[in-house]
Image: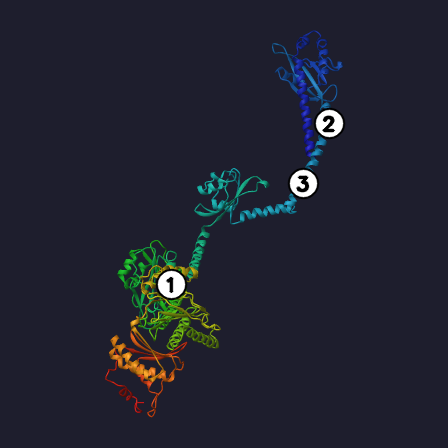
Amino acid sequence: MVAVVVAFLLHAQWDSSRHARQEGLAVAKTFAHSPGVLEGLDSPDPTAALQPRAQAVRKATNVDYVVVWKPNGIRVTSSEPDLIGKRVVRPYKNIVERARRGLPTTTTLEAATGGKTVNSAAPITRPDGSLAGLVSAGVKVTRVNQGVKNQLPVLLMSAAGALILASGSSALVSRRLRRQTHGLGPTEMTRMYEHHDAVLHAVREGVLILDEEARLRLANSEARRLLELPRNAEGRRIDQLGLDAGMAGLLASGRTASDEVHLAGGRLLAVNVRATRAEEGAPGRVATLRDTTELRALEGRAEVARERLRLLYEAGVRVGTTLDVVRTAEELTEVAVDRFADFATVELLDPVPRGEEPTEAPTDMRRVAISGIRTPSPLYPVGEVTRTVGLTGTGEGTADGTGADSVGAVLEPDLREAHAWQEENPERARAAVADGIHSLITVPLRARGVLLGVVDFWRADRSTAYGEDDLAFAEELAARAAVSIDNARRYTRENAMAVTLQRSLLPRGLPEQDALEVATRYLPTRAGVGGDWFDVIPLPGARVALVVGDVVGHGLHAAATMGRLRTAVLNFSSLDLAPEELLAHLDELVDRIDQDQAAEGNGEAVTGATCLYAIYDSVSGRCTMARAGHLGPAVVLPDGTVEFPEIPVGLPLGLGGAPFETAELHPPENSRLVLYTDGLVEDRDRDIDDGLAQLHDALAGHPERSPEETCGAVLDALLPPDPSDDVALLVARTKVLPPERVAQWDVPADSGAVAPLRARVTRKLTEWGLEDVAFTTELILSELVTNAIRYGSEPIRARLLYERALTCEVSDGSSTSPHLRRAAATEEGGRGLFLVAQLAERWGTRYTPHGKVMWTEQSVHNGATGGEEDEESLLDQWDDGSL
């Protein structure tokens, strides 16, 4: 501020002096050119003529004196009269010389009146140009300084105000700077700036600072190196620095960029552009540059590694989804093609797709899967034998020239140089190379140390050749796929065993009978064998038992349990039990099975098994049935209408605690009984009510359909493409035994009634054309009726049924059943039932609510004994020696 004050003082003094000179010169010139001055000067008394005028001018202006003097220096006028006629202060000669040339003169001199004076002299010239005299006007320096002194208070006050304002502003700015710099002082700020400058030029990333007009303001050393900037780059527009068009366009565009890659001097640079913060400085942009040429190569390798990991993950997800050996191999080729290989093939040993364990014997290896970027390919198709594998697992021959030793993985980076590979099958090798295939990796598929097959990865066309990294990846991919293939193989084996077991437990064929026309279907699920079963069991008396059951679950346990239950039903039905009694016995059996398995600790309970048991009598047309937790049947009447009769439902087998109830139906002849398991009408995507409605629609309106046609139509309409449960379906068309094929007589409890009965039987058999079996039939009926009269009770009734076989039935009101025994030679009785057992093909006892029925069955074709035999000749066969 002192310097400012001094400067202002000097400037004020200089300005005042300049003003004094200008003012004095102006007065002198004006007076010199005033009218009458020249005449007064040349007059005889110039002082008298000019002195008053000079004094008047001095008083009217700011000058201290106005002096007119002649070229010889003699004053004509003066503010001091004593000085008139005296010479002016030297040096006047220089002033006169300048005046003669018409030039004014301003000098500072010691005035005769005292004190330094700023003196200005102007020439008075005659018309001819000669110098007549001079006019001097002066201003004392003291007056000039007085003007400066007058300005000094204002100047000092202004300086003080400026000082105060500057100090306050400096304090505020200093306070803000300290706040922004977190209390750092000038020294620390200087050091920090030096550090920042050092870092800016040492960092391995280019930094550019541009203003709003895209002029380069700063570039660090790395930016200069990457962009090859000239030395004088700062201050020039970015498009004048010789950069590539893309780079220059980005920097000049003003837009924001994040890791955009641009070419600059043969380098790939990742460029980031951001705007500076305008509130803290001039608007502009900052750009950073990073050389990604080497980084790109590293990223490329990293991307390959990431892609390999993704492919391995995808292979883990996609390979082995179906537990089917061939499909698993196809999934392996599909995953590999286009992302790792152009073609991929899988060959497996012949036992593997069948689920068998490979043996040490030489075995063909057959192609099971192939995928490629185009078809057809020069490689052998699916089904061809590609090599034969012996004890060591070494390929002895190849069909398409792979030439792989399956003991370990083989890499052929250039098939054109693989001479051994070409020699094994030259024709196939030439075809592969001509098609563009140029690189190969062959990897064995091993699981648990067992060779299952090989997988070949081929590359063709413009794909890069395989390397060691690819070989390691191929081995990893093959190892994972081999586990899936082996799991599928083992599942195939176990599933085949379970299917074989289940098929062996299901009926191989339908038995011969005339009461029903039956058709059946069984469809296993892909999830494994289940526990659904059906059965058709002929019963005596022109009756047939129909059975449909379901064991919850899948697999060997369900199949084995189903076999046990089916065997039990067959055994119980041989006792000719009523449906509710049979289910009660079956329920007890399941409960015992559960207890045995619980004791063994395997936890595989049968609880949840269901069963429907029905008995159809073709003589009366009556159908009695009971069900244990099973779905009820559907009945298709002869006119095509469908009914779902109400059958009392019992608890599933094994739960116990409640009796089973029987329902009795009387379907008309040619009605169709439809029995099924829940897999037909219930699915994960379908409610059971919807399934029953669809079953109703599939059955209704087609009275002409046979049972076989009905089974096909029902399965086509209801079975989904991939059922989640197995399905058992049984359709039976009812028949009624014609009345003329039935003969029935009431027998009084009198032994004398046997002979008339035999006569009636003979006449009926003659009527039926069965004279060949008349004698045997008379003998059987005689023994049965005699036994009922002797040991039974009334009412006694005899009945003959003629269908496929001849059935003799004798019923009485007693529930006591005779037993077959060996009679001694001395006993008179005890041989009748033994005789019946020898003459009939089958015999037995059936209990009814009102007693029992003794029955026999005889073949009408090969069971005749001849009419010439009598009872005594037959009895002679069982003497003591024969017994």
- Mark number displayed over residue 328: 1
Q: Residue furthest bottom?
A: 826
Q: Earlier in the sequence, mark 1 or mark 3?
A: 3
Which sits in the foreground, 687 or 8? 687
Please identify the quadrant where the N terminus is shown. Answer: top right
Q: On the image, which quarter does residue 855 sit in?
A: bottom left
Q: CA distance from mark 1 to mark 3?
A: 80 Å
* Colouring rule applied to residues: rainbow
Judge the density around disc 3: few (<14), some (14-19), many (≥20) Cα neighbours within 10 Å.
few
Q: CA distance from mark 2 to mark 1?
A: 111 Å
**How far across and down, in percent of the image, does residue 805 sit?**
29, 75
- Residue identified by numbered label 2: 149
Q: In the image, which is nearer the foreground, mark 2 or mark 3?
A: 3
Which sits in the foreground, 762 or 465? 762
Q: Secondary structure at mark 3?
A: helix
Q: Residue furthest left?
A: 868
- Residue identified by numbered label 3: 172
